[in-house]
Image (tube, rainbow, N blue to C red):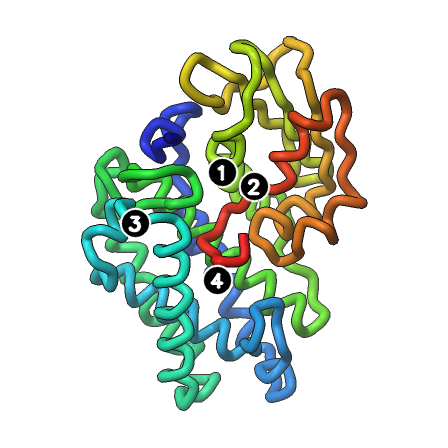
Amino acid sequence: MVRSWDVAGDLPPVDLRPLISAERAELLGFLRSLDDSGWAAPTANTGWNVHDVALHLLGSQIGRLGSTRGGAAREGRMAFDDLAELIEHSNEDWVRATRRIAPFVTVELLAFIGPKVDDAFAALDLDAPGTSVGWTGDGPTPYWLDIAREYTEYWVHHAHMRLAVGAVPPIERRFLYPVLDTFMRSLPRAYEAIEAHVGTRVDLLVEGEAGGRWALRREAHRWHLVPPDEQVAAACVRVPQDVAWKLLSRTIEVPEGLPKIVIEGDERLGLPATRAVAIMTTQA
């Protein structure tokens, strides 16, 4: 069993709190530029238009000011599929209930609630247990990784809204690299059932201005994320950055992404990286 807390300890922690407010400023500017047709544009989130996605983000941020989930969900004591289903139903209920909120009011509410979320995050002990990040493993998660996951959700939905109206997502390295780096915490769970000799290494190389190289090494009890070094990897998975974030967030499905991915070396060891998922979804 892969434990989220252990995965969080594989690599040094990151503090993405300052980036959340910077990304929000970009989002608010974008939303304020939309006309009625932009707000009504369908997104990659099935059944949701741009307004619905903005309402979902509003609900997520309100939820951070007072936990809306039970203790079992918060501490990661629910099975992945059960927790994903609970979250999906909760998200759909919220969006359905709030659609009467006008788009311009939605923007102002996001602008109002965002700094309060920043203040709440600023008061947290980053090493204390936060809301469980189920796609990294079972059990509790330190707050720094919980907050990093929150940033990835904000960024991905922002990207979805921009793509819906034909705009370019915020793919500058300062915004996208932390998303990819956080998403890589999904790899040990994706490899949980993959057998290999101790010391075997698999590299995942994301190609693009916001990309980088991440490495997994098989140790006695599980696969660990490790800093890349000069060791020859048994498999190297090369993924364009636009495919990487879309695949890990299930903006696209695995069959759509595979033709653009190159696996060098042992294909058996490379393929699990293409199936990693870094969101809570019943479609994983």
Count the numbered circles shown: 4
Which residue does the numbered mark 2 point to in the structure image? Answer: 276
Mark 3 / mark 2, whichever is N-terminal: 3
Q: Residue at x 72, y 51 (%)?
A: 255
Q: CA distance from mark 1 to mark 4?
A: 28 Å
Residue drawn at x 72%, y 38% is 239
Mark 1 is surrounded, within 10 Å at the Cα level, by few (under 14), some (14 to 19) or many (20 or more) other residues, namely: many
Secondary structure beneath disc 3? loop
Of residue 62 and residue 44, the one placed in the foreground of this image is 44
Q: Is residue 242 visible?
A: no
Q: Amino acid at mark 1?
A: Ser
Name the residue carrying label 4: 25
Mark 4 or mark 3: whose residue is earlier in sequence: 4
Measured from the top left, where is residue 265 in percent x and y?
A: 75, 21
Say above or below: 206 vs 248: above
Tag 3 residue: 78
In the image, which is nearer the foreground, mark 4 or mark 3?
3
| Tag shown at residue 253 | none
Q: Name the residue at 35% across, 27% down.
A: 6
**Residue type highlighted by circle 3:** Met
Which of discs 2 and 4 lies nearer the camera? The answer is 2
As displayed, is residue 22 above or below residue 55? above
Residues under numbered marks 3 and 2 in contact, where contact means CB atoms less than 8 Å apart: no
Looking at the rendered structure, the kind of residue marked 4 is: Ala
| Lower sequence index among marks 2 and 4 | 4
Residue behind mark 1: 186
**x then y, percent, for residue 194:** 55, 26
Mark nearer the viewer, 3 or 2 = 3
Mark 4 burial class by Cα count in 10 Å: few <14, some 14-19, many 20+: few
Q: Could you tell me how far apart the alpha carbons at marks 3 and 2 are, in whole angstroms?
A: 19 Å
State how far apart marks 3 and 1 are (Cα). Answer: 17 Å
- In the rendered image, residue 192, in percent from the top left (x then y), is placed at 48, 30
